[in-house]
Image: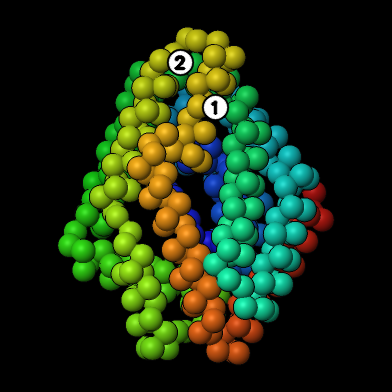
Amino acid sequence: MPYLKNCLPAQGPWRRLWIIGALLVGTLLGLGGCTALRLSYNNAETLAFWWMDDYFDFDKTQTERVRTDLADMARWHRREELPLLAELLENAQALAQKQPDAAQICALYERGLLRMQALAEHALPAMAAVAPTLRPSQVKNLAAHYDKGNRKWREEWLTTDTDALDKRTQKFRERLEDFYGPLSPDQSRQLQQRLAAAGLDEAQMYRERVRRQQEALRTLDGLRGDSAANAQAALGKLMKEYFESSDPAYRAYRDRSVAQTCEAMAQAHASATPQQRSNLVRKLQAYAQDVQVLRGQSP
């Protein structure tokens, strides 16, 4: 479910290394309109290259390799993963027409997370071939982008508790309204109360974000000139770190946050009007139809 993605550090190092995965899944689960979905999905490999090149400034040889690998991955995803995402959307539609509890919503979220893991695992060999060729200046360029993003993150989220809660509520409400339509003042108040009770900790999220970034930079520096086999093993550890933090305190926080967000989603759906539920079903149906169209198109 797109509402849950803020429970994980969205700017972690794994997202930077495997940006194609975020684009391919994100276009299916996070865009606000079907036209945008088809356009972004069909151009995912180009968009992904531009994004990655902005972070690494690839040379000619790297560019050729990355473009080829992204094209291969896009074809693989259309062939292998779109059917699974279509099934995921069908399950979401079925839940939307009932009264799901928090456990059912979390189960759907975890299934979506598995699709991201499948993308990351499929991308490992390609990224392992490029990582040892990165020059010091390219890793420094990535570090500079991290610093820029971190400054923006601090300005937006490391403010007063009240400001952070207001921003969190606004973003959550906007995501809900993308699918349900406008929320009533009472629904908005209930949402803010639930998020306040959830106790999300922006400072802890920021520490984890920076820790993962530093680990990514150290890993890339250490892989320079190394073999593809060693690179794949090292990047595999980064992948595991992204999906399951090695910090026990953060793992406990993440699990608690996801559970609380699932509960908030279940309560929000319970308070939805018949019209809002109908809006949600229609939106999910539209996404499902677009996935079917994409599956039928040539890669």
N-terminal of the pair, mark 1 or mark 2, is: 2
Left or right of 236, for residue 35: right
Q: Please name the residue shown 54% across and 67% down the image.
A: 102
Task: Identify the residue under disc 1.
Answer: 236
Residue labelled with disc 2 = 223
Up the image or down, 294 lies above or below 213; here it is below
Above or below, 27 against 219 in this view is: below
* Residue neighbourhood size for the residue with mark 2, other residues' Cα within 10 Å, grouped as few (<14), some (14–19), many (≥20): many
Image quarter of the N terminus: bottom right
- Label 1 to label 2, Cα distance in Å? 13 Å
The amino acid type, in three-letter code, at marker 2 is: Leu
Q: What element carries label 1?
A: helix
Q: How is the image coloured?
A: rainbow
Tell me the residue at 37%/73% (across/down): 194
What x and y, as percent, mark residue 196? 31, 69
Dividing the picture into quadrants, the one containing residue 257 is: bottom left
- Kind of residue at disc 1: Gly
- Foreground residue among 141 and 87: 87
10 shown above or below 218: below
